[in-house]
Image (tube, helix red, strand yellow):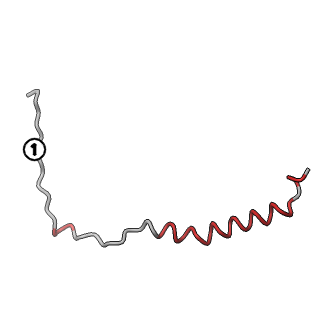
Amino acid sequence: MPQLNPRPWLAIYFFAWLMFLAFLPFKVSDHSFPEEYADAATYISQPENWLWPWL
């Protein structure tokens, strides 16, 4: 049975993990935040009043 021959599958396995580990850090770092957040002290939010129609 050819699927039990580890010679080609072992090379494919290692090559796939090598590609996975080579490109994964770049893919993850693309999702980091590119801009710094503004300080919380510079933005003061005004709370909105809730409307209770049943009262």
SS for dot 1:
loop
Viewer-proximal residue among 43 and 8: 8
**Which of the 4 quarters of the picture holds residue 33?**
bottom left
Q: How many marks?
A: 1
Give the amino acid type for the residue marked by disc 1 in the picture.
Answer: Asn
Extreme residue toward the top, this view: 54
Q: Residue at x 11, y 33 (%)?
A: 52
- Name the image quarter holding the C terminus: top left
Q: Residue at x 89, y 53 (%)?
A: 2
Q: Position of residue 19 (x, y in %)?
A: 65, 69
Q: Position of residue 16 (x, y in %)?
A: 69, 64
Q: Residue at x 61, y 72 (%)?
A: 22
Give the left or right position of residue 16, taking residue 4 as reference: left
Q: Position of residue 12 (x, y in %)?
A: 76, 63
Q: Residue at x 72, y 68 (%)?
A: 15
Give the left or right position of residue 53, taking residue 17 as reference: left
Extreme residue toward the left, this view: 55
Q: Which residue is mark 1?
A: 49
Tag 1: Cα neighbours inside 10 Å, few (<14), some, or many (≥20)? few
Give the left or right position of residue 19, taking residue 42 as reference: right
Q: Position of residue 3 (x, y in %)?
A: 85, 52
**Is 33 drawn above or below residue 50 in the view shown?**
below
